Image (cartoon, rainbow, N blue to C red):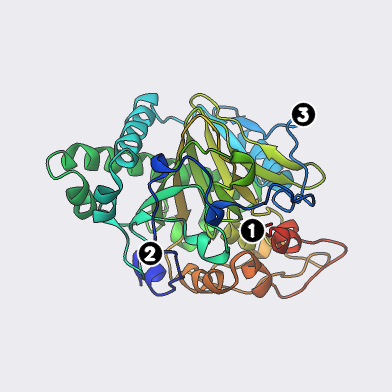
Amino acid sequence: MPSLSEAFRGHPVYLHQKHHDFNSLQELPDSYAWTQPDDDDHRLTNYPSNNKTKTVVPIIDLNDPNAPNLIGHACKTWGVFQVVNHGIPTSLFSDIQRASLALFSLPLHQKLKAARSPDGVSGYGRARISSFFPKLMWSECFTILDSPLDLFLKLWPQDYAKYCDIVVEYEAAMKKLAAKLMCLMLASLGIPKEDIKWAGPKGEFNGACAALHWNSYPSCPDPDRAMGLAAHTDSTLLTILHQNNVNGLQVLKEGEGWVAVPPLPGGLVINVGDLLHILSNGLYPSVLHRVRVNRTRQRFSVAYLYGPPTNVQISPQVKLVGPTRPVLYRSVTWNEYLGTKAKLFNKALSAVRLSSSINGLFDVNEDKSNDFQVG
């Protein structure tokens, strides 16, 4: 079975190799300008930003006995929700934020010592999705797929150990939470964890693969024309996101437009990925999301990208198939799907779909994904 790192290396994407020192940029370079000052068609947004209404992403208390039903409703209607009372100590969030700040505050030449290779994904660089857009995103990222030791030795020759310890503890906590969330999501679909062969006898999902993705969105001199992270869906089963206290994350809600997901003290954002979309036979949509930037404040986030063993076949569960809802997707492994995603980006789901529509049902992200163009 290929590791997740090997799977990503097997499906490389072209990334811009030039990196800028954001602190030295007093004006927005044209290479980062997604719209022009006289651009009246607002192609950057496409859908109205819904910040003036009280539409909010669901917040779910994991101690609530009704949590599975609440999660199921949130997944079906939003594809995203926030959780509280998840069992992760706030001290661990403080630690991971401190590590993120320490990393992204390093001089650019120091960060580049841990730059990812052209065909790799571990280390410092740009978001993998940037290869699909002609303009650059106002962000930088750092991805950990295996042990952080070698990377952190390059960044902090003297202090690497304390940062490694933080990552190990954080990943262990996220793995445990992700397994719990998977069990709750499966329960909300009426699927016993015993039906998922790789779940393990106690639903611990020990064979799962994951990546830790750190993001920095520096303050931007012209945020209205810049994009922190362009609209996309994740290839995962689910993603667990911790964000600091700076706004920026938005999700696309059908009929509502772009809805902000404000930071929730102690909360975590959970979004449905493409593989869970497939496993649920389209019942749980993988949510399109993006990040806008801020004029005066830097935003940090840490994403835990969670999926199955890379060679496990993911297909619609038989309990979710019937006369009125036939199988909508073919079986696919995460390894194979990463290859499809590397070629087709947000059209990857359409590529593995067996039927374009059924009784008026459609996938919002498949219909909308090509609308996100630059100005």
Instruction: Answer whether labels 3 and 1 touch (C-beta < 8 Å).
Output: no
Residue under pointer 2: 4
Query: Callout 3: few (<14), some (14-19), or many (20+) C-alpha neighbours within 10 Å?
Result: few
Residue positioned most to the left:
158
Q: What's the residue type where badge 3 is placed?
A: Lys
Residue under pointer 3: 52
Gap in angstroms between the C-alphas marked 3 and 2 = 41 Å
Q: What's the residue type where badge 1 is placed?
A: His
Gap in angstroms between the C-alphas marked 3 and 1 = 30 Å
Q: For the C terminus, which image quadrant?
A: bottom right
Position of 38 with respect to 108 (left or right) is right
The relative height of residue 112 versus residue 1 in the rendered view (above or below) is above
**Residue 73 position in % (x across, y down):** 71, 41
- Which mark, by number, is residue 254? none
The relative height of residue 223 versus residue 361 in the rendered view (above or below) is above
Residue under pointer 1: 277
Q: What's the residue type where badge 2 is placed?
A: Leu
Secondary-structure class at tag 2: helix
**Callout in the foreground (3, 1):** 3
Picture residue at 63% right of the left edge, 45% below the top: 225
Secondary-structure class at tag 3: loop
Position of 342 with respect to 99 (left or right) is right
**Residue 55 position in % (x across, y down):** 75, 32
**Callout in the foreground (3, 2):** 3
